[in-house]
Image: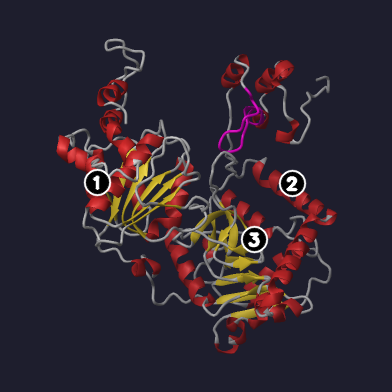
Amino acid sequence: PMPREAAMRLAEGCGPGHPPGRTQAPRPPWLLALAALLPTIGGLASPAREARGRLSICQQLQQRGQSGIYGVVERLCALGAQHRRFTLIDAQLGQNATLVSTLWLSLTEGCAEGAGGGAGRKRAVAYVPSKRAAGRIPAQGEHIAENENPLAAPIRPTDVLMVALPAEQRHSALHMSSFVVRRCIVLIGSVGEHSLEARDLGLRLPGVWTVQSGQWPSSIAIICRDPGYSTYRLQQFAFPQRADFRPRIVFLSIIGDGRQFKQHLGRSSIYRQRASSKHRWLLVNGTDRQHLAPYIASLRARAERESSSDLLLFLHPDLYLPDTFEEELLLSVQRLNHIDPNWAVAGFFGVPLDWSPEPSSPWSRPRVVGRGGDHYGRYTMGWSNVTAAQCVDETALLLRTRRGQFGGAGASPGFDAALPSASRIWLGGTGTVLEGLAQGRRSYVLGVDVLHQMKDILDSPSEDRHRFIDERRWQAMHKFSSAGSTIMHATAMSYMSEKYLRSKRVDLKRATISVEVLELLLSERADVNVANRNGATPVLMAAQENIAESLEVLLDATAFVRLRARHYGVRCEDRHGSR
């Protein structure tokens, strides 16, 4: 334990070699509170502290009367005393480790001393990338979930959730797990983050939340749920529901020789019971070797001419729809209409709109979200079962028709018949999402349970399933790694890039760097190959902008920059090839 006098001098700006009167920069007020507790923290880390008669943080505050220093720790002790289940999500990246550790200790110490929930029923779970990280003091009796990713799957139900994540991951974590939080969420911002905007954040979470009043530091916020919260009510979707919302759907599928259809889609109860349903099915045998883009565009036009249904659902024949499919789909569509009445297209698998690579983070958000499963496993998504998408998989595309209750201007964007495609390859999901974004409309992934290429495997003997799954994975890898598939994907992506991105119809938001900052980095011989948390390096950001001044600065510094080809996969030359 650090002596109290030394701890207070450190907090007041006097380092080990700085006597009073020769101070460093002023420390934030919360650091003064932590300094008052540093002599205690050393004892908290020891399992034998009770035997030595040491007092907890909460007991020391009560005994010494130090609760007036912002009241942060005292109030967290009080919050902990009222509950019995606590969860910490701490990436140990960009946060103040001592602050996070002390607040977590305060919660769990308060729980240990309070009556909240009865004896023998306390639980503290900490999601951390490493339990040996510097600056972290474990709480007594906590369970370390070291190898689990809380950004990819919901956590277990908890009374209080403490979140210490970078800003771009914080929203994803809350979107994934806030529905299992019974009472409060403690948010701890990154170093240098001025405001958490907890009031706006609380309004975007399920249920009714209020921001706790008090003089909290700007990097700390606490939001608590309405006491009348019910997990069951949330699962039943807490939004206005219409009893008469029963849209008619046309199911479309190109079934080929019918073999996959009989094994998967044709075994779905919604198809087998089609005679007593108001929905309609349009099945075609094949494209007669036509390219898919013009064929599917004409198939959609035919479906809209021949039916007055409200929705069109394009399905691959190897997709199985469980018995709960229709109920889940209608609930998700109704919720989507409530969130965004102008939605463009929806799918059951896709990449979130705000997803980007996170090479420097110990945890990563899932690249593909949904509720369905395939031979790669079961996918997950946030509590709302509705996620804005940057692309959706073509296994299922849900469209609004022109003649139904979503008609007129609300119809989904049309399919591009000129999109490069083949008889078995079509990127219409990505193309339609981009067309929607060009019109100012978003597309979404819906959390509906479906099985892709899995129904026949699940019906096979258990001893054969792993072999069948491995075969399906190999077949998928072989299909998409073939020369024809690679060329077709590249051609289609180049076409969409020219049509939407280079034409500026869709704003491609990417990191940029000014000429002045680039010159400063190079003048200090900084490594311009180091990527930020979005995976962009100074060299890459300068080249993406294609500004002559930035390129000239780079070319003038090639003597010492030492570009690493493995970061970019291309050679760096000027237009004359002289460097």
Label 3 Cα neighbours within 10 Å, binned few <14 / some 14-19 / many ≥20: some
- Image location (x, y in percent) of residue 298: 72, 68
Quarter of the rendering containing residue 576:
top right
Circles 2 and 1, Cβ within 8 Å, touching? The answer is no
How far apart are labels 3 and 1 at the CA level?
48 Å
Report the disc number at residue 269: none
Residue beneath disc 3:
393
Q: Is residue 250 magenta?
A: no
Residue beneath disc 1:
77
Given residues 16 and 275, the one toward you in this image is 16
Q: Indicate the quadrant containing the C terminus: top left, top right, bottom left or bottom right.
A: top right
What stretch of residues is rendered in magenta? 527-542
Left or right of 164? Residue 317 is right
Secondary structure under tag 3 reads loop
**Where is 199 relative to 542, above or below?**
below
Quarter of the rendering containing residue 31:
top left
Residue at the image position 31 percent from the left and 20 percent from the top = 26
Closer to viewer: mark 2 or mark 1: 1
Residue beneath disc 2:
494
